[in-house]
Image: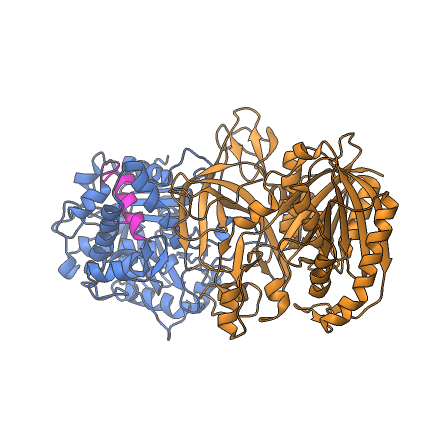
Amino acid sequence: MSRGIRDRVAVVAMGCTRFGEHWSRSAEDLLLDALEELFATTSVTRDDVEAYWLGTLASGQSGLLLSKALALDYKPVTRVENYCATGSEAFRNACYAVASGAYDRVVAVGVEKLKDSGYSGLLRSDPPGDGTAAELSLTAPAAFSMLDPAYCARYGVDPGDMRSAMTHVAWKNHHNGALNPKAQFRSPVTKEKIEAAPKVAGRLGVFDCSGVSDGAAAALIVRAEEAPDYTDQPMYVKGLSLVAGPARGAADPDYDYTTFPEVVRSAQDAYRQAGISDPRNELSLAEVHDCFTPTEVVLMEDLGFSDRGRAWRDVLDGAFELGGRLPVNTDGGLKSFGHPVGASGLRMLYECWLQFRGQAGRRQVAEPRLALTHNLGGRPGSCVSFVSVVGRQLG
Amino acid sequence: MTGLVAYATYLPRPRVRLPEIAATLGTGPAEGERVAASYDEDSTTMAVEAAARLLCTHQATPRAIYFATTSPAYLDKTNAAAIHAALALPQETFAADVIGSARSAFAAWRAARADGGLAVLADVRTGRPGSSDERFGGDGAVALLFGDSAAPIADVLAERSWSVEILDRWRLPGRQASDQWEERFGAETYLPLVRHAAEATLAAAGLDSADHVVVVSPNSGVRKQAMRAFATASTTPIGHSGAADFGLGLAAVLDRAEPGETILVLSAVDGCDALALRATDHLPAGRQRRTVAEQLDDGVVVPYATYLGWRGWLEREPPRRPEPGRPAGPPSARAVDWKFAFTGSVCSRCGFTHLPPVRVCKECGAVDEMQRRSLAGATGTVATYTVDRLAYSPSPPLIEAIVDFDGGGRYPLEVADARPGDLAVGTRVGLSFRRLFTAGGVHNYFWKARVLEPPGGSAGAGGGAA
């Protein structure tokens, strides 16, 4: 558990590229595009920034990816990687650098260039091994598809109802993404089309899977007391939590593939730091790691938005739609906005940033106060989880 | 000399229907089916299956393993070492390959008999599409254990061999399929020798005739004519199976022979090898648990096109996924007990089972307080599962299950010989040693789950450990 840095740092500028298949842009181009957008909204220049945190899973190595692309003036650039939570991890560490007093102005930026490989989905670069690890062959959609039969078995949910809930998640996030000019997929998709899609793994079709995309997103972070000097609407950091699990679920027959203990722990930690006791009612919106549709269903329970065994029902009841009791993935989520791994955590914060500023257009949530972002890296049974709570005001 | 104390066989489950081959290739009418190793099986994995079945029912520590095959997975590397590792035998056990022709099996028999070892005979027989080797060959394995036991299942009464240089069947190294001369040429050369071998061996055994005669040969003319020549003759139950041929033929007789009955084995390969045996009173109790005939009945038909893909005759569009990397030598050596014998660790303090073995207990945090536990013979239950249509697999889709083992331990495993629909939460599974894939010239051997009781009962049944 962390003591936390509630209200000690704030985001005062952000940038985010459109996510999608950027055949004509390199990782360096995308980094520059996101940062140029950020710097265009503030008087701070890239040389005013004292240190950078760069998140990328596999689109480059070391801080040189950024320092070369921006021709930085001998700045500290820390490259971080933590699976699909990489972008959030860049943000978390950048926040701590400011909170520590070591720097006054830092940038967290994340990027991923997935569409240069020619392959579908994420690629792994594993160290030499003995060839026995299941992750070597089993793809991410297959690993997450295991939640579906396990959830149905545990709670006695009719597989048809679960399928409907998964479809509803995809339908909702595509609906939201269609309202977002920066999303990878900007067309609403009918439930019939979602369910008729070719199967990828288990019962997951292509519409149950997040978009494979290129993109970058960035945040400028300063000390909270100085934030009003930079912008009239800073976004304050209330809580930051990261958990790397012991991979117990992959080894323990007591783990039943209907929850992510890592998410539960990181949410508890972040809520405590932020002083949240009733997330369902205190949060105005949540950006969660909807890598695959059953993931979002399970996350609603792990984050405390639904009772155990009830998320599928709440999803179908529209609780998490734009007009629902707690809008989730208002920007379209990984599903529709796309999932350039190193950028995704910062993209979630970018949506909170827009929502707090009233700039979310037709996705706008009424008077948002507190928002949550959640990032997951790995797979059920063996993962890292990040949760942040950000707010529009101090206190 | 030692005695034959146990035997066991392994027949892979896939079957290719000969009428489908005929219809696909436009050849003449055909009936029946052939036994085919799955895409993830090779001579080494099938040898492990047969040997593990034997040691499961007849606890013993063989002094040596002699592994005979005409389809070795590796050259310049001892395949018997992988079998030895999978059986978790002590380092002092000698393990060697006898590679080459079907006759190598007889060398393995002789060596094992001489020093109380395990002869493991296994083969994947591949012929060009449309060839008689493709239609009338079969894949399988047999393990024969010799020992000092006072209770042999059969006494060897005589053992004789004759050698002949003949260009009847041959294959250049690296080639998938064999060539043959005209069948009658081989048949007419072999048959007088087979008759002579039978007479001489019976005489040496002090017998006038045998109750059972097994005649095997890669030359189908020899098989056909010899079957006519001997009243009680049988041959390999799955067609010519290379180095496994005479062993499978013998095993099928041991499955049914009565105590006191005599067995004459004649194997015509580059000469003739002959054995005369007498079943003992210990045979009925020492028979393998699942007979050759029962295994033969427990097949699953695969499309001919699938089989062609398995053997490399039909190259299909791969998924848009990278092929896996090759297993590395040092990590594989460090993990040899895990990778080959499915050995995990159990915390001495709290009893939590870890697969693979670890140093720090996930349950209680104890460090380096672990004991080893092999789960190679274990059974378990499916906690959840999936069918991965995106993953790279030599034969998509990849089917994977989270397996909870009886007595503790969980691991995600591919499921062998399964079809989508064979699995449910709660399905009972066992283990099977397989070749997951071959990458960078390295075979990735590891264990897969195997369905014991599919959901709803009958379809796709069986395949359990013998």
Q: Nearer the viewer, residue B92 or A30?
A: B92
Q: Which chain is blue?
A: A
Which residue is at 64% across, 66% downward? Answer: B133
Near-viewer residue (A93 or B37) = B37
Q: Position of residue A127 (x, y in %)?
A: 56, 54
Which residues, given as a range, are shown in magenta? Answer: A288-310
Does the magenta segment cover residue B453? no
Q: Which of B24/B229 is in front?
A: B229
Q: Where in the figure is residue A105, as x and y percent of width and height?
A: 34, 54
The quarter of the image holding the N terminus of chain B is: top right
Is A300 contained in the magenta span?
A: yes
User: How many marks can you see?
Assistant: 0
What is the quadrant of residue B294 in the picture? top right
State which quadrant residue A20 falls in: bottom left
Residue B127 in view of the camera: no
Residue A136 higher or lower than A185, as above or below = above
Residue A190 lies left or right of residue B273; in this view the side is left
Residue at 36% x, 61% y: name it: A340
Q: Residue B293: where, in percent of width, then height?
A: 58, 47
Which chain is drawn using orange?
B
